[in-house]
Protein backbone atom coordinates (compact mmCIF):
# COMPACT_ATOMS: atom_id res chain seq x y z
CA UNK A 1 0.00 0.00 0.00
CA UNK A 2 1.28 3.48 -0.82
CA UNK A 3 2.25 5.65 2.12
CA UNK A 4 -0.69 7.82 3.17
CA UNK A 5 -0.75 10.92 5.33
CA UNK A 6 -1.49 10.27 8.99
CA UNK A 7 -1.70 13.86 10.15
CA UNK A 8 -4.35 16.27 9.12
CA UNK A 9 -2.77 18.64 6.57
CA UNK A 10 -3.48 22.36 6.35
CA UNK A 11 -5.53 23.40 3.32
CA UNK A 12 -4.08 25.46 0.47
CA UNK A 13 -5.05 29.12 0.16
CA UNK A 14 -7.50 28.27 -2.63
CA UNK A 15 -9.67 25.31 -3.51
CA UNK A 16 -11.52 24.92 -6.78
CA UNK A 17 -14.98 23.75 -7.80
CA UNK A 18 -15.44 22.58 -11.38
CA UNK A 19 -18.92 23.43 -12.70
CA UNK A 20 -20.80 22.72 -15.94
CA UNK A 21 -22.16 25.73 -17.81
CA UNK A 22 -25.80 24.90 -16.99
CA UNK A 23 -25.07 25.43 -13.31
CA UNK A 24 -24.42 29.15 -13.55
CA UNK A 25 -27.17 29.42 -10.92
CA UNK A 26 -24.51 28.44 -8.37
CA UNK A 27 -23.08 31.95 -8.77
CA UNK A 28 -26.44 33.60 -9.37
CA UNK A 29 -27.96 32.33 -6.11
CA UNK A 30 -24.76 31.80 -4.08
CA UNK A 31 -25.97 28.27 -3.32
CA UNK A 32 -23.88 25.16 -3.87
CA UNK A 33 -24.81 21.50 -3.67
CA UNK A 34 -23.56 19.27 -0.85
CA UNK A 35 -24.17 15.56 -1.46
CA UNK A 36 -24.33 12.44 0.73
CA UNK A 37 -21.29 10.20 0.14
CA UNK A 38 -23.50 7.54 -1.45
CA UNK A 39 -24.50 10.03 -4.17
CA UNK A 40 -20.99 10.76 -5.44
CA UNK A 41 -19.69 9.40 -8.74
CA UNK A 42 -17.48 6.75 -7.09
CA UNK A 43 -19.39 3.49 -6.65
CA UNK A 44 -16.87 2.46 -3.99
CA UNK A 45 -17.11 5.78 -2.16
CA UNK A 46 -18.42 3.98 0.89
CA UNK A 47 -16.26 0.92 1.46
CA UNK A 48 -14.39 -0.81 4.26
CA UNK A 49 -10.90 0.71 4.36
CA UNK A 50 -9.79 -0.84 7.67
CA UNK A 51 -9.58 -4.34 9.14
CA UNK A 52 -10.47 -3.37 12.70
CA UNK A 53 -12.36 -0.55 14.39
CA UNK A 54 -10.60 -1.29 17.67
CA UNK A 55 -7.11 -2.67 17.27
CA UNK A 56 -4.11 -2.59 19.63
CA UNK A 57 -3.62 1.18 19.32
CA UNK A 58 -7.18 2.09 20.24
CA UNK A 59 -7.22 -0.51 23.01
CA UNK A 60 -4.06 1.02 24.47
CA UNK A 61 -5.73 4.45 24.50
CA UNK A 62 -8.69 3.03 26.42
CA UNK A 63 -6.38 1.24 28.85
CA UNK A 64 -4.40 4.43 29.50
CA UNK A 65 -7.63 6.37 30.06
CA UNK A 66 -8.86 3.67 32.46
CA UNK A 67 -5.61 3.84 34.43
CA UNK A 68 -6.14 7.58 34.88
CA UNK A 69 -9.87 7.32 35.60
CA UNK A 70 -11.15 9.28 38.60
CA UNK A 71 -12.67 6.44 40.64
CA UNK A 72 -13.59 8.70 43.55
CA UNK A 73 -15.31 11.12 41.19
CA UNK A 74 -17.30 8.28 39.65
CA UNK A 75 -18.40 7.05 43.08
CA UNK A 76 -19.37 10.59 44.08
CA UNK A 77 -21.50 11.01 40.95
CA UNK A 78 -23.18 7.63 41.55
CA UNK A 79 -23.92 8.48 45.19
CA UNK A 80 -25.69 11.71 44.27
CA UNK A 81 -28.23 9.77 42.22
CA UNK A 82 -28.76 6.91 44.69
CA UNK A 83 -30.51 6.30 48.03
CA UNK A 84 -27.01 6.32 49.59
CA UNK A 85 -26.49 10.02 48.90
CA UNK A 86 -25.99 10.67 52.64
CA UNK A 87 -22.69 8.77 52.49
CA UNK A 88 -19.43 10.42 51.52
CA UNK A 89 -16.98 8.72 49.16
CA UNK A 90 -14.79 7.21 51.89
CA UNK A 91 -17.81 5.80 53.71
CA UNK A 92 -19.14 4.28 50.50
CA UNK A 93 -15.75 2.69 49.71
CA UNK A 94 -15.53 1.23 53.21
CA UNK A 95 -19.02 -0.22 52.88
CA UNK A 96 -18.27 -1.77 49.47
CA UNK A 97 -14.96 -3.18 50.74
CA UNK A 98 -16.77 -4.81 53.64
CA UNK A 99 -19.24 -6.42 51.23
CA UNK A 100 -16.74 -7.53 48.57
CA UNK A 101 -13.71 -8.15 50.74
CA UNK A 102 -11.55 -6.31 48.21
CA UNK A 103 -10.00 -2.89 47.71
CA UNK A 104 -12.76 -1.01 45.93
CA UNK A 105 -10.50 1.09 43.73
CA UNK A 106 -8.50 -1.95 42.61
CA UNK A 107 -11.73 -3.87 42.03
CA UNK A 108 -13.26 -1.11 39.89
CA UNK A 109 -10.13 -0.70 37.81
CA UNK A 110 -9.97 -4.46 37.27
CA UNK A 111 -13.62 -4.54 36.19
CA UNK A 112 -13.00 -1.63 33.84
CA UNK A 113 -9.95 -3.42 32.45
CA UNK A 114 -11.98 -6.60 31.92
CA UNK A 115 -14.64 -4.58 30.10
CA UNK A 116 -12.03 -2.95 27.83
CA UNK A 117 -10.51 -6.37 27.09
CA UNK A 118 -13.91 -7.53 25.80
CA UNK A 119 -14.54 -4.44 23.67
CA UNK A 120 -12.54 -5.42 20.54
CA UNK A 121 -14.60 -8.55 19.89
CA UNK A 122 -17.80 -6.52 20.13
CA UNK A 123 -16.65 -3.46 18.20
CA UNK A 124 -14.98 -5.47 15.43
CA UNK A 125 -17.98 -7.69 14.77
CA UNK A 126 -18.89 -7.46 11.05
CA UNK A 127 -22.34 -6.04 11.79
CA UNK A 128 -20.82 -3.21 13.85
CA UNK A 129 -18.28 -2.41 11.14
CA UNK A 130 -21.17 -2.23 8.65
CA UNK A 131 -23.10 -0.02 11.07
CA UNK A 132 -20.17 2.41 11.35
CA UNK A 133 -19.76 2.59 7.56
CA UNK A 134 -23.49 3.22 7.10
CA UNK A 135 -23.40 5.91 9.77
CA UNK A 136 -20.46 7.67 8.15
CA UNK A 137 -22.25 7.49 4.80
CA UNK A 138 -25.68 8.57 5.98
CA UNK A 139 -25.16 11.32 8.53
CA UNK A 140 -23.22 13.90 6.55
CA UNK A 141 -23.12 15.96 3.38
CA UNK A 142 -20.00 16.89 1.47
CA UNK A 143 -18.76 19.35 -1.12
CA UNK A 144 -15.95 18.05 -3.34
CA UNK A 145 -13.23 20.55 -4.25
CA UNK A 146 -9.84 20.25 -5.91
CA UNK A 147 -6.37 21.63 -5.21
CA UNK A 148 -5.88 22.16 -8.94
CA UNK A 149 -7.57 24.52 -11.35
CA UNK A 150 -5.53 23.42 -14.38
CA UNK A 151 -6.27 19.70 -14.55
CA UNK A 152 -7.31 18.69 -18.07
CA UNK A 153 -9.09 15.52 -16.86
CA UNK A 154 -11.03 17.54 -14.29
CA UNK A 155 -12.07 20.09 -16.90
CA UNK A 156 -13.17 17.22 -19.14
CA UNK A 157 -15.04 15.21 -16.50
CA UNK A 158 -16.60 17.91 -14.31
CA UNK A 159 -16.80 21.09 -16.39
CA UNK A 160 -18.45 19.91 -19.59
CA UNK A 161 -15.25 19.16 -21.51
CA UNK A 162 -13.91 22.67 -20.78
CA UNK A 163 -17.18 24.38 -21.73
CA UNK A 164 -17.98 25.22 -18.10
CA UNK A 165 -16.14 27.15 -15.41
CA UNK A 166 -14.26 26.84 -12.15
CA UNK A 167 -14.95 28.76 -8.95
CA UNK A 168 -11.83 29.59 -6.92
CA UNK A 169 -12.75 29.63 -3.22
CA UNK A 170 -10.75 31.36 -0.50
CA UNK A 171 -10.21 28.78 2.25
CA UNK A 172 -9.77 31.51 4.87
CA UNK A 173 -13.46 32.37 4.42
CA UNK A 174 -15.95 31.71 7.21
CA UNK A 175 -17.65 29.34 4.76
CA UNK A 176 -15.00 26.74 5.58
CA UNK A 177 -15.25 27.16 9.35
CA UNK A 178 -17.83 24.59 10.38
CA UNK A 179 -16.38 22.99 13.50
CA UNK A 180 -17.76 23.32 17.01
CA UNK A 181 -14.85 25.62 17.89
CA UNK A 182 -15.23 27.67 14.70
CA UNK A 183 -12.20 26.00 13.17
CA UNK A 184 -11.48 24.24 9.90
CA UNK A 185 -12.84 21.00 11.32
CA UNK A 186 -15.12 20.34 8.38
CA UNK A 187 -12.43 20.58 5.69
CA UNK A 188 -10.44 17.42 4.98
CA UNK A 189 -7.96 16.25 2.37
CA UNK A 190 -8.88 12.97 0.70
CA UNK A 191 -6.36 10.15 1.02
CA UNK A 192 -5.90 7.85 -1.98
CA UNK A 193 -5.01 4.22 -1.49
CA UNK A 194 -6.12 0.71 -2.32
CA UNK A 195 -6.56 -2.02 0.23
CA UNK A 196 -7.01 -1.41 3.95
CA UNK A 197 -5.21 -0.07 6.99
CA UNK A 198 -4.95 -2.59 9.88
CA UNK A 199 -7.04 -0.45 12.24
CA UNK A 200 -8.72 2.96 12.18
CA UNK A 201 -6.16 4.47 14.57
CA UNK A 202 -3.39 3.72 12.06
CA UNK A 203 -4.82 6.54 9.95
CA UNK A 204 -8.17 7.96 11.14
CA UNK A 205 -8.48 10.42 8.26
CA UNK A 206 -7.38 7.94 5.62
CA UNK A 207 -9.65 5.21 6.95
CA UNK A 208 -12.77 7.38 6.90
CA UNK A 209 -12.00 9.98 4.21
CA UNK A 210 -10.40 8.20 1.27
CA UNK A 211 -10.83 7.02 -2.30
CA UNK A 212 -9.11 4.37 -4.35
CA UNK A 213 -5.82 5.31 -5.98
CA UNK A 214 -7.39 5.56 -9.46
CA UNK A 215 -9.02 8.83 -8.34
CA UNK A 216 -5.82 10.53 -7.19
CA UNK A 217 -5.76 12.89 -10.19
CA UNK A 218 -8.66 14.77 -8.58
CA UNK A 219 -6.47 16.08 -5.70
CA UNK A 220 -9.68 16.32 -3.73
CA UNK A 221 -10.55 18.12 -0.53
CA UNK A 222 -13.94 17.80 1.11
CA UNK A 223 -15.97 20.27 3.07
CA UNK A 224 -18.43 18.46 5.33
CA UNK A 225 -21.71 19.96 6.49
CA UNK A 226 -24.82 18.94 8.36
CA UNK A 227 -28.20 18.53 6.71
CA UNK A 228 -29.49 21.50 8.70
CA UNK A 229 -26.84 23.71 7.05
CA UNK A 230 -28.78 23.47 3.78
CA UNK A 231 -31.08 26.45 3.21
CA UNK A 232 -32.79 24.80 0.24
CA UNK A 233 -33.73 21.13 -0.06
CA UNK A 234 -35.45 20.01 -3.25
CA UNK A 235 -36.26 16.63 -4.76
CA UNK A 236 -35.33 15.61 -8.30
CA UNK A 237 -36.37 12.12 -9.43
CA UNK A 238 -36.60 10.78 -5.87
CA UNK A 239 -33.19 12.25 -4.97
CA UNK A 240 -32.89 15.01 -2.40
CA UNK A 241 -30.73 17.98 -3.40
CA UNK A 242 -29.19 19.96 -0.53
CA UNK A 243 -28.09 23.51 -1.34
CA UNK A 244 -25.87 25.34 1.14
CA UNK A 245 -25.33 29.12 0.93
CA UNK A 246 -21.85 30.58 0.58
CA UNK A 247 -20.79 34.21 1.09
CA UNK A 248 -19.91 36.13 -2.07
CA UNK A 249 -16.65 37.12 -0.38
CA UNK A 250 -15.61 33.45 -0.34
CA UNK A 251 -15.07 33.62 -4.12
CA UNK A 252 -11.67 34.88 -5.29
CA UNK A 253 -12.13 34.50 -9.03
CA UNK A 254 -13.98 32.58 -11.71
CA UNK A 255 -12.09 30.69 -14.43
CA UNK A 256 -13.78 30.06 -17.77
CA UNK A 257 -13.03 26.85 -19.64
CA UNK A 258 -11.17 27.08 -22.93
CA UNK A 259 -14.38 26.10 -24.77
CA UNK A 260 -16.76 28.28 -22.76
CA UNK A 261 -19.20 30.19 -24.95
CA UNK A 262 -19.36 33.97 -25.28
CA UNK A 263 -22.84 33.75 -23.78
CA UNK A 264 -21.47 32.11 -20.63
CA UNK A 265 -18.65 34.65 -20.47
CA UNK A 266 -21.08 37.57 -20.64
CA UNK A 267 -23.45 36.04 -18.09
CA UNK A 268 -20.70 35.36 -15.54
CA UNK A 269 -19.13 38.76 -16.15
CA UNK A 270 -22.49 40.39 -15.43
CA UNK A 271 -22.96 38.37 -12.24
CA UNK A 272 -19.50 39.34 -11.02
CA UNK A 273 -20.11 43.02 -11.70
CA UNK A 274 -23.44 42.94 -9.84
CA UNK A 275 -22.60 40.84 -6.80
CA UNK A 276 -18.96 39.80 -6.54
CA UNK A 277 -16.83 42.91 -6.01
CA UNK A 278 -13.11 42.33 -6.44
CA UNK A 279 -13.57 38.96 -8.16
CA UNK A 280 -11.64 38.54 -11.42
CA UNK A 281 -12.72 36.60 -14.50
CA UNK A 282 -10.02 34.56 -16.25
CA UNK A 283 -9.86 31.81 -18.85
CA UNK A 284 -7.94 28.51 -18.81
CA UNK A 285 -6.05 28.67 -22.10
CA UNK A 286 -4.20 25.66 -23.58
CA UNK A 287 -0.48 26.14 -24.19
CA UNK A 288 0.38 23.42 -26.67
CA UNK A 289 4.13 23.89 -26.31
CA UNK A 290 4.08 23.03 -22.62
CA UNK A 291 0.89 20.93 -22.74
CA UNK A 292 -0.47 22.92 -19.81
CA UNK A 293 -3.40 25.22 -19.14
CA UNK A 294 -2.43 28.85 -18.59
CA UNK A 295 -4.82 31.18 -16.80
CA UNK A 296 -5.22 34.50 -18.63
CA UNK A 297 -7.43 37.53 -17.88
CA UNK A 298 -10.64 37.79 -19.87
CA UNK A 299 -10.63 40.93 -21.97
CA UNK A 300 -13.74 43.05 -22.41
Image (cartoon, rainbow, N blue to C red):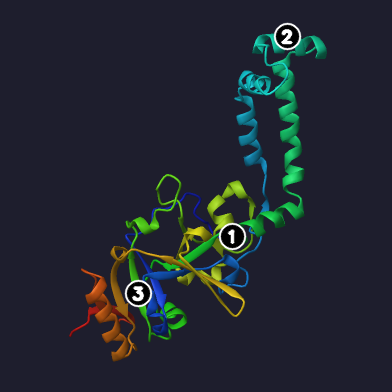
Q: Where does the image place residue 87, in percent across and percent down from the top left?
A: 68, 11
User: Alpha carbon of mark 3 to alpha carbon of mark 2: how far?
Assistant: 70 Å
For the residue pair 103 and 275, the one nearer the viewer reads as: 275
Residue tagged 1: 1
Residue tagged 2: 94
Residue tagged 3: 27
Q: Where does the image place residue 53, in percent across and percent down from the top left?
A: 67, 48
Q: Where does the image place residue 297, in percent across and percent down from the top left?
A: 21, 79
Vertical placement of 66 versus 51: above or below?
Answer: above
Tell me, yes or no, whether the two marked residues, 3 and 1, touch with CB atoms within 8 Å: no
Name the secondary structure under disc 2. Answer: helix
State the residue at coordinates (70%, 54%): 129
- On screen, residue 191 versus residue 248, left or right, reads right
> How busy is the neighbourhood of tag 3: few (under 14 within 10 Å), some, or many (20 plus)?
some
Name the secondary structure under disc 1. Answer: loop
State the residue at coordinates (53%, 68%): 35
- On screen, residue 25 versus residue 139, left or right, reads left
Amino acid sequence: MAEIERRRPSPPAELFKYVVSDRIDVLENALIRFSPPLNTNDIFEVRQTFDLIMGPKMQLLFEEAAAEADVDGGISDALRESPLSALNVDQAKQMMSAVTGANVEHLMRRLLGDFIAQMPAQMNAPENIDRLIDRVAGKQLLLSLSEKSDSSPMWAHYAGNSSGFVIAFDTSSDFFRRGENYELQGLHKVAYFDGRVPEIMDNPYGALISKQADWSYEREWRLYAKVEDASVITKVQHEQIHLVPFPHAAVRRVILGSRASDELKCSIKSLIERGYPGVHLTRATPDRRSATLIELPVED
